[in-house]
Image (cartoon, rainbow, N blue to C red):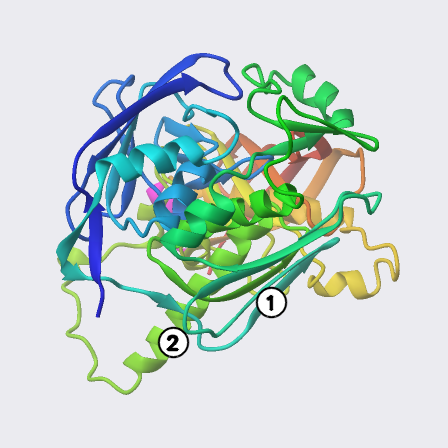
Amino acid sequence: MLQQQTLRDPVRLAGVGLHSGNRVNLAFLPAAPNSGVRFRRTDLAGQPEIPARLDNVTETNRSTTLARDSAKVQTVEHVLAALAGLGIDNAIVELDAPEPPIMDGSARDYTRVLDEAGVTPQGEPRDVCTVAEAVELSAGETFMSIFPHDRLRISCTSADRRGQYTQFFTVEITPETWRRELAVARTFCFFEELEFLIKNGLIKGGSLENAVVIRDDAVLTNEPLRFPDEFVRHKILDILGDLYLLGRPLVGHVVAIRPGHATNCELARQIAAQGRKSFVAMQAFSPPPAPASAEGQTGAESLVTDGATLDIEAVMKILPHRFPFLMVDRITKIEGNRIVGQKLVTINEPYFQGHFPGHPIMPGVLQLEAMAQVAGILTLKKAENAGKLAYFMSAESVKWRRPVRPGDLLVIDVELTKARGKIGRARGQCLVDGDVVSEAEVTFMLVSA
């Protein structure tokens, strides 16, 4: 069995953040066995750390963002891809800003300094994540799957919406293929996207020094393309980085068509869920654990605290809803009377069969239900509401501003405006890519379960 690995020596590099445009200093440091990869914000009080795990993913729009409590780090995928490609299990990534330096838009410089640091084995065995059976998901024009395989292979097809620059590449991931085939592939975007990004205060550090821009049939770059199929190779780089949020090396054959960060992370979640099911099945043939003491037991209400984030398992401990009517996948923020949840809308949602065939749109009433469910979670901050259910009673000032389609990540932002006795009232918005798609004031009643 292979051993875990960390860095032999600390190494540092500096550059400019893609979105902030500010100078960023970054260091890779060795870490103890079984500690995984952690981002440490040295510019914040107490130098908080954010483990690179799926539970800490809060945003997947154009890059992957991790957050824990008040600390966050965005655009982590290139750093994680370099660590994954070189087989580094445990490391601390120190940085003095909320994003790593973009460097030249690839993972070349990260790989270079990690090679300078050297890799050293540790005494603990490596825990590899395998898949027992195929996992598949689709969202809009994106399809992703993973099949059992004895090593990690990624096969990817990328294309823009007009069908230009369609590229395919497949590669088995090893340190050698990582350095040779993937690490130097640069990020890219389309010219028509630049106005939106700039208006939203993004890519302040972006330039042709760190990205390739596609404008119609022209490719704008400060140097020739490093590969004829550089775009799809960078897509594989992103997949590798996002899947490393599983917290351990992955073994399997990933097949992706037009992937993005949201679906990369959703595939990782489904892989993790399959692993949990296998573990539960294994436990069924094992002696039952000793019962927990009453002193150590905690109710669902103990999960709903300021600063907490809740994954789908925690959400299901709180809400009684189940498929096909659970309208929230995770909670990313709890702060005072405000709560933020997420729902990844995929083509597998059962209502798309009839709403509408050939033109799938998420029903507006289900967006209202999502607001009510997220609001119901927030009510459990009060101990007297433990064990109660929130019944959706009414909605006012309802506005639907644009359709929600398969592939959209629905962000559900709710503020509790009234909580007196059995009646609660909340103001909610659903957003996609930062734009409000629906809003309403919802009223609900708390009843005993």
Residue farthest to the top?
A: 22
Identify residue type, mark 1: Glu
Q: Which residue position holds label 1? A: 136
Range drawn in magenta: 382-387
- The answer to whether one can see residue 132 in this image is yes
**In this view, 393 is above or below 224:** below
> Helix or strand or loop: what does disc 2 sit on?
helix
Q: Circle 2 sits on which residue?
A: 278
Of badges 2 and 1, the one in the foreground is 1
Q: Residue at x 69, y 63 (%)?
A: 348
Q: At numbered mark 1, what does the secondary structure look like: helix, strand or loop?
A: strand
Expressed as whole percent of the image width and height from the top left, the position of residue 183 reads: 47, 41
Distance between the alpha carbons at the discs numbered 2 and 1: 17 Å
The answer to which of 329 and 306 lies nearer the viewer is: 329
Closer to the camera in the image, 271 or 366: 271
**Frontmost residue, 72 versus 189:** 189
- Identify whether 136 is placed above or below 386: below
- Displayed quadrant of residue 214: top right
Residue 385 in view: no
Quick one: label 2 or label 1, which is nearer the N terminus?
1
Give me the residue at 63% from left, 47% from top: 232
Left or right of 437 in this view: 127: left
The x and y percentages for residue 96 are: 32, 19
How many residues crowd mark 1 within 10 Å: few (<14), some (14–19), many (20+)?
some
Q: Which residue occupies the foreground of this view, 8 or 140?
A: 8
Q: Which mark is residue 291?
A: none
Corner quadrant of residue 284: bottom left
Q: Is residue 221 left or right of residue 24?
A: right
Q: Amino acid at mark 2?
A: Ser
Mark 2: few/some/many CA within 10 Å (<14, 14-19, 20+)? few
Residue 341 placed where, x, y %?
Answer: 53, 41
